[in-house]
Image (cartoon, rainbow, N blue to C red):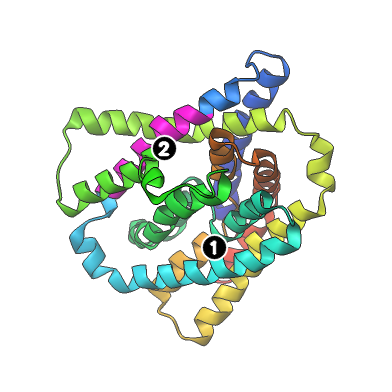
Amino acid sequence: MQIVSITLTQLANMFFFMAIGYVFRKKNILDIYAGGTVSRLLVNVFLPAMVIRSFSSNFKLDVISDKLMLILFSTAVLIITSVLAVFLAKMFSKDKATQGIYIYSFAIPNLGYMGYPLVQAIFGEAALLDTMVYCLPYNIFIYTIGIKLLTSQKNASVWGLFKNPSIIAILVGAFLGLCDIKLPAAVTGILDAANACVSPCAMILTGTVFARINMKSVFTDWRSYAASAIRLVIIPVIALFVMRLLKVPETWVLPCFAILAMPLGVNSVVFPEAYGGDAESGAKVCFMAAILGVVTIPFMFALL
């Protein structure tokens, strides 16, 4: 019951802010430029602040050396699921831009907003730390390959990629963490305040995207259901079976399976809206996976 309660609470928060974005856009309280404005705030200010805060706290030399095998395991899982995602995405669309949305959907679950709170509440602080370390490769993927998958910047140069605010934030956060540099309280306060803006703004943005979609198509498009089933059930179940077969340590199984069982995160909406991608397809899968996650997440956790 605790899993259901936490999941419902997180989803209620998500849908509340989505509803604000949806209604405000429909009523023209937010104009047609609002989505672009909010998305640019997210990718240029709030997300970089969140990345710096996360990496400066978790990307520490002692943590990496102590958890190196867990990080390598996470990297291997991410590579395997990403390769699988490339093949699966071709079943859903022939359009390269839309394929990028589905590749991201199958490779990257909802980490911070759904995964971390559930793991912390159910399994405790030690499991949360392992999960956050496990997700380091995922965070690097999100703000590098993930940006290219979700946006029109497919052919961007390497130098152009490294001018991206989130990439710069990774480098700054990693440097602060590796050098164990303590930021002044005023700076951490600013970063925490910006971090707190990420989820509400991302949900409001998603709501404005829904306002320009025929909502009936969300529930009648078979791809939304199929992609959600792959994201929420098929990938985590296969991963759990393989891990049990290979006798992977339980301290690795928990963070891997818990994260893989999460729905899709809202970056599939934020990045396309900011950089000129297919935000509508991302919004559909994100919405459907979140709804179905209420049912699937408790069942998935019961398998552990």
Real-space Cα distance between discs 2 and 1? 22 Å
**Residue 273 position (above or below residue 303):** above
Q: Badge 1: few (under 14), some or many (20 or more) residues near its Cα, within 10 Å?
A: many
Local secondary structure at mark 2: helix
Q: Which mark is residue 114?
A: none
**Residue 177 position (above or below residue 169):** below
Judge from the rendering whether residue 2 lies leftward or rightward of residue 102; answer left or right.
Answer: left
Question: Overall secondary structure of the magenta stretch?
Answer: helix
Judge from the rendering whether residue 286 lies leftward or rightward of residue 158; answer left or right.
Answer: right
Local secondary structure at mark 1: helix
Q: Is residue 97 magenta?
A: no
Q: Which residue appears at 73% of the width and 20% of the height?
A: 26
Res 255 → quadrant: bottom left
Q: Is residue 45 magenta?
A: yes
Task: Kindly identify the amino acid type of the residue bearing the numbered disc 1.
Answer: Leu
Say whether disc 2 or disc 1 marks the residue closer to the N-terminus.
2
Task: Kindly identify the amino acid type of the residue bearing the numbered disc 2.
Answer: Leu
Q: Which residue appears at 84% of the width and 38% of the height?
A: 216
Q: Which mark is residue 47?
A: 2
Chain part drawn in magenta: 39-56
Q: Which residue is mark 1?
A: 260
Q: Nearer the viewer, residue 202 or 153?
A: 153
Q: Position of residue 70 (x, y in %)?
A: 35, 71
Camera-nearest label, 2 or 1: 2
Q: Which residue appears at 56% of the width and 74% of the height?
A: 239
Res. 196 visible in picture: no
Judge from the rendering whether residue 122 lies leftward or rightward of residue 175; answer left or right.
Answer: right
